[in-house]
Every structure is written in C-alpha cells, then in structure tokens.
Amino acid sequence: MYMHFILQALRAVSHNYPDLMLVCWGQLSAIVYKFLREGTAEIATKSWKEQAGNTTVFVGEKIVTSSIKVLDECLRAISGFRGTEDLSVEFFLDSPFTSDCIRTKKVSSAPSYGPKCLEDAKEERNTCPSGSQQWAETIEKLMPLILWHISAMVRSASVTCFAGITSSVFFTLSKENQDFIVSSLINAAEHDKVPLVRSASCRAIGVVSCFQKTPESAEILGKFIHAVEINTRDPVVSVRIPASWALANICDSLRHFVEDFPLKQSTDSETNFHLVELLIECALRLTKDGDKVKSNAVRALGNLARFFRYSSSPCVDKKPARSEPNAFDGGGITSSCPASLKDLHWLERMVQAFISCVTTGNVKVQWNVCHALSNMFLNKTIQLQDMDWAPSVFGILLLLLRDSSNFKIRIQAAAALAVPETALDYGKSFPDIVQGLEHVVENLGSDSISAPSSFKYRIALEKQLTSTLLHVLSLASASDHKPLKDFLVKKASFLEDWFKMLYSSLGETSAQSETVGCDSTGQKKEMIYKAVQSMIEVYKSTNQQSICQKFKKLVVL
C-alpha cells in the first residue's frame, strides 16, 4: 500500500514542480518502468480483442495505474502541456472596445507553465522543444507494457497519456511513432469493449484533432471522424460526451484549416465532401441528446456552418460570387440540382437545431448557440437577408441579450449581433436590432449583479454592447425605414450623452493603450466617429437641424 502513496506523491511533485521533471526524467522513468514490469510480469500475453473484453481486477492494478498517472503528469510537464489547444477565437475580442477582455484559460496540468503574455508563450515554444525524446522512449519502451493490458483501468490510464501530448511534440516524433499513437487511439475507440477505455480514447482523439496539421492528412482525419462517429452512438453517456467533444474539436480544426488554406485542393474532394456530410448528420443527431452532448453538437454545427459553402441558386452549376474554390466546397462536388437543395436543407436543419437547443438547453448550450450563430453569420455564402428564418434567429439573440440572467450568454449574443457587415445583411430585422440594443444599453445600469464574480462579466458585457451598438448605429444612415429614424430622433438626447461619455472615457484608456503597446484609442475614436456621422446623416434626412448641430459638436470634442 505504501508504494501507492509514494506514487501519488511523485505525481503531485510532477504536477506542482513541472520545471524539475526534465532533470528528473531518468530516475522517474526508471521507477515507472520497474513498477510496470513487476505489475505485468504475471499477465499472459493475449490478443487485443481478448484483453479488451476482460475486466478482471488483479493485485497490482492500482500500482500500475498510479505509475502510469505519474508518467502522464511527468510527460505533460516536460512537454509544456497547458491544456487542450483552443482554436476558437472569441468574437467579442475583435473590437478595440473589447480587446482588453482577454480571458485566461485555467489549465489542469503544469500550472507554472502558464505564460505571462503571448510573446512569452511563443518564446517558450521556440526555446523549449522538450518532450520529443521522452515521448519516443515512452512509446517504444513503456506503452507496449500497458496499452493492451488485461485491466481496463490500466488501458484507460495509458490512453489518457496521449491526451497530454502537444502538437509541437507530436509532429517532431518519427512517422512510425505518430502512426502508433493514431492507430492505438483508433483501436481503443473502435474495439475496446469497456466504456472507460473508449471514453479516454475519444478524449485523446479530441486533443490530437486540435493540432493544426492534423486536417492536412485526409487519412488520419477520416479515421478519427469514423471512430468518433461510432462512439457518439454509444449507449453509455460517459462515452458520448467525450465523443461529441472530439467531434466539435474536429469541426473546429477543419474550419481553421479551410480558412488558412482556402485555395488548397484535396486529391479527393468527393471523399472530403462525404466526411463533412457525415459530420453534419452526426452533429444534428446529437442536438437531440442531453445537454452535455448537445452543447458540443451545437459547437460542431457552428464550425461547420462557418466554412461549408452553400449554394443558394436553383442549381450548383452557378457558384456564389463570393465563394472561393475549396476542397470542402459542397457546391463544387457535383453540378446537379439536388446538391444545391441538399445544401439549403442542411442549413435549414442547422438553424432549426439552434432554435430548438436555445429553448430547451441549459446555460452552456445557449452560450454555444450564440457562438454558433456568430460563426454562421461569418459565412459569406449565406445571404442572411434572403433567409426566411433570419428574423427568428435575430429575435432569439435579442431575447437572450435582454432577458438572460447569465452575463456570458448576453456577451456572446451581443457579439453575434455585431457580425453582419451591412444593414442589408440584417434584412428586415435591422430596425428591431437597433432599437433592442439601444434599450439594453440605456437600461444596463438597472441590471443587478447577483455575485461579485459576475462583476468582471458585467464590464465585458458593457464593452461588447458599446461595440455592437456603435456598429449598428454606423449603418443606420443606410436604412430608409422611417419608424427607425423616428426612434433615433426620440432617443437623440440619450445618444448625445452616451457619445459624450464614450469620448470622455477615451482619455482614461489612452494610458492603458500605451502600456499594452496598441493604439486602441485611435480605433475607438474611429468607431465613435463613424457612428456619430451616421446619426448626423439620419437627423439631416429628418430635418432635425438643432439635433444635427449638437451631434456635429461631438465630432470636434
């Protein structure tokens, strides 16, 4: 029993003092190897399928499992693992008013590796490419002892190690070792009969699929997709949750790959099309699952909705003018009418899934719906103004922004409403959006904060609302909607005071901008100036000369 406590202590040291692990690797790996050898000495060698179905507990199971967890923690520390590589970009970080609302990601491993800034992180990756040698040793010497172990707990712990590898380490390994990791994960996900092992393998697949180079290999990507899709059908929810998480990560990785290489053609675009089709159908099915699965399914659909090229014409022979050729271009697979209709059918089903999830899902699901809609709005092949469902979608975002008690949901809803670039993109919902945003901003001070921890989100919400309202006000002069203009005349006094407050706040933030080395003050002035000029045009068109003069004075403040 004391050996178990010793291993727990070693794991704690690896977790809390990661900087020491590279120096201590030789001794630690020797200790782990000794325990693994002794713990597996009495286990007869069996085939994968024979051992995968055996759930017998043997005497040394806890010792072997604890040894693997020490190994896992040590490898994460040496490799500089900070958590799953997050490819997502929060939309509320794109505006100069919200650029300082950067969230730090809490990592459950190697805490002292947390970078102080992005520059430090880049420098660490360039100067500390450690982990490759240790991982190669682990794969060649230690993994054969545990990956096909008779104990499901041991197999699960061994597969979990792969969830701690980093992309920099993975792609410096030999091709043989990379293939070993991929094949081990696929085998565990598809063939192991124990849910604990399948769950761990899906989690690891979700990590590896986030590596930026993974989508470049259609073979690896296809294997991952099929393995994950199989597990999303598992009757055990503890398997479906990490499988759906991996599915969302694959879609996120695909989206970034398509955006980074928009003109890169695949040697087999039809295969890619069918993979995307499989992802869409799988994600749509999962939106009917429980909330923990549903939130990942919505995230997956949001990523797919952003990069998939939709054909709005009766036939796909005629591509949208703003669409680039792409290996994942649905309209480029065939020139028959059904493909175009199928694209639109997928789009409508996605939107219906979003609407259903936002009304039936929990807070996390609702946040992901807002994020997914932001992604969908960024797809230039979707003509929002022509979509019958657009008013419903904008209405849901306005409802969440106004009535949700969760600040993070309101932030993301406001961010989504800022994505369309022109008044035309908002369609007939534009007047409602302008009025709804103005109402929320005007009454923001009356919102109660239930907990001190919510205060930082309140500040972020205020900044995102400022950015979004400035955006839509800058587009208001392009609208001929008389009731909207009448509303803006009615709210002229509030808007005048609000613009004055924004201009006065620029002096307070200019020093902060110099500290962080960015000219956000100038960008803020530009956004305010555009909105004020737009209001001047609105008041000119309504013959409100006195109001017009007041707003002209704002420009020279």
Image (cartoon, rainbow, N blue to C red):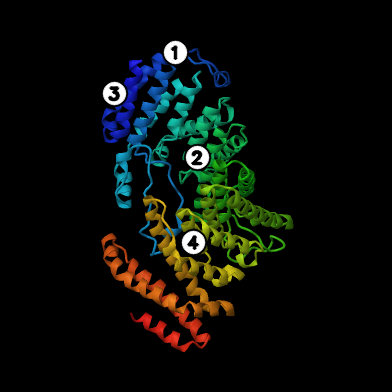
Residue named by callout 4: 414
Mark 1–mark 3 contact, CB under 8 Å? no
Please tell me which of labels 1 and 3 falls first in the chain: 3
| Identity of the residue drawn at 51% across and 18% down | 150
Residue named by callout 1: 59
Q: Could you classify mark 4 by the number of other residues whose Cα lies within 10 Å: few (under 14), some (14-19), or many (20 or more)?
A: many
Q: Circle 1 sits in a helix, a strand or a loop, which is it?
A: loop
Q: Circle 4 sits in a helix, a strand or a loop, which is it?
A: helix
Is residue 254 left or right of 28 when viewed as pictured? right
Could one spot residue 127 in this view of the protein?
yes
Is residue 532 left or right of 511 when viewed as pictured? right
Q: Nearer the viewer, residue 405 or 253?
A: 405
Q: Circle 3 sits in a helix, a strand or a loop, which is it?
A: helix
Please tell me which of labels 4 and 1 falls first in the chain: 1
Q: Could you classify mark 3 by the number of other residues whose Cα lies within 10 Å: few (under 14), some (14-19), or many (20 or more)?
A: few
Residue named by callout 2: 206
Please tell me which of labels 2 and 1 falls first in the chain: 1
Q: Measure how far apart labels 2 and 1 are at the Cα level.
A: 32 Å
Question: What amino acid is labelled 1 in the image?
Answer: Val
Please tell me which of labels 4 and 2 falls first in the chain: 2
Q: Measure how far apart labels 2 and 3 are at the Cα level.
A: 31 Å
Q: Measure how far apart labels 4 and 1 are at the Cα level.
A: 57 Å
| Identity of the residue drawn at 53% across and 45% down | 248
Question: What amino acid is labelled 4 in the image?
Answer: Ala
Question: What amino acid is labelled 2 in the image?
Answer: Gly
Residue 511 appears at what percent x and percent y? 26, 65
Residue 424 appears at what percent x and percent y? 58, 71
Residue 377 appears at what percent x and percent y? 55, 61
Question: What amino acid is labelled 3 in the image?
Answer: Gln
The nearer-to-camera label among 2 and 3 is 2
